[in-house]
Image (spheres, rainbow, N blue to C red):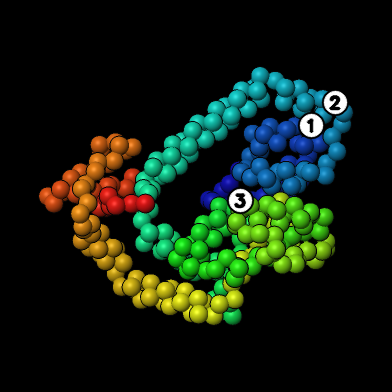
Amino acid sequence: MQTNGIDPLKWWQKKEQIQALRQQGFSYREILDRLPFRVAKGTVSRWCKDIELAPEHLDRLDQLKSGSWYRNRLKGSKTIQNRRAEEIGRIEETARREVPRLTQKELWLAGLMLYWAEGSKKQKVEFSNSEPKIIRFIMKWLRVFCQIPEGKIKAYLNIHSGQDDQRAKAFWAEVTGLPLSQFGKSYVKKEGTGHRKNVLYHGTIKITICNKNLLHTIRGWTAGFSERTSGPLAQSVEQDTLNVKVTGSIPVRPNNLDDANFVMDRRGEYLLRSNFSGTWRNWNTRRI
């Protein structure tokens, strides 16, 4: 009982009451229902984790778990999980459909932002990651937009001890399209070095290009992007979008999205509405 908003019981008095109920064989939920004060279930668990229950108390708790109330609780929890999974699926599918086929300029900008976030900015062009889809994209970006000769690209792996180096190299060779001859010596992490414990199945790959001019070019691109976006970004993006005009193109109504997401403006061009932000954007008909 609390008086004038002040709890008269000390924490150790609460702990004694909780432990006494646990020693009588009550479950954590039953303990919470019997307490005259509020306490988190995690606190009850922490205070009672070292209490050994009598065999008859353990049997009773097992019967509670196998009872209909427990089964219904699990069933309800599973239903909520399934409902949430379906909701997440709908959200992701809607978001996926909002992404149209990308123009060359958009692909170049996406790769630049990825390198700006994850790539090296000193000494040489380097990009490290463990996600194959990201590595495939950055390799395409380097080949198409940076026009790097194949022989100038080197790859190095970072793996854990016990992993198969040759198997990992074969995997990343397929992802990158690089021959095994362009893979250098892998770095193998030894056990007990204090590094994180989760072992990446194929390790991490580092793409390296020794080309100072390319490094300075990328740094110039990112500097230019930073300058262009240092002002009121929302207004500049909206204005640039409305001014888009593709010479010689005929607006084509996309077939894969519903009518509620499209309108035609007075210039005869389709505008796409984002389900996420609700804003309207020009639908570029010349896409690759």
- Vertical position of residue 105 compared to residue 280: above or below: below
Mark 3 surroundings: few (<14), some (14-19) or many (≥20) residues within 10 A:
few
Residue indicated by mark 1: 25
Callout 2: helix, strand or loop?
helix
Q: Depth check: 42 or 218 in front?
A: 218
Q: Are marks 1 and 2 in contact (CB under 8 Å)?
A: yes
Q: Amino acid at mark 1?
A: Gly
Q: Is residue 219 visible?
A: no
Residue extending furthest toward the left: 266
Q: CA distance from mark 1 to mark 3?
A: 27 Å
| Picture disc at residue 233 | none
Residue 63, position as x, y percentages in the image: 76, 22
Q: Earlier in the sequence, mark 2 or mark 3?
A: 3
Q: Amino acid at mark 2?
A: Glu
Q: Amino acid at mark 3?
A: Asp
User: Residue at horizontal 70%, vertical 53%?
Assistant: 170
Question: In the picture, residue 70 is in which quadrant?
Answer: top right
User: Residue at horizontal 63%, vertical 27%?
Assistant: 74
- Vertical position of residue 159 compared to residue 149: above or below: above
Q: Depth check: 50 or 198 in front?
A: 198
Q: Quadrant of the N terminus?
A: top right
Q: Earlier in the sequence, mark 1 or mark 2?
A: 1
Question: In the picture, residue 155 is in which quadrant?
Answer: bottom right
Q: CA distance from mark 2 to mark 3?
A: 35 Å
Residue indicated by mark 3: 7
Callout 1: helix, strand or loop?
loop
- Vertical position of residue 62 compared to residue 146: above or below: above
Residue indicated by mark 2: 56
Q: Earlier in the sequence, mark 1 or mark 3?
A: 3
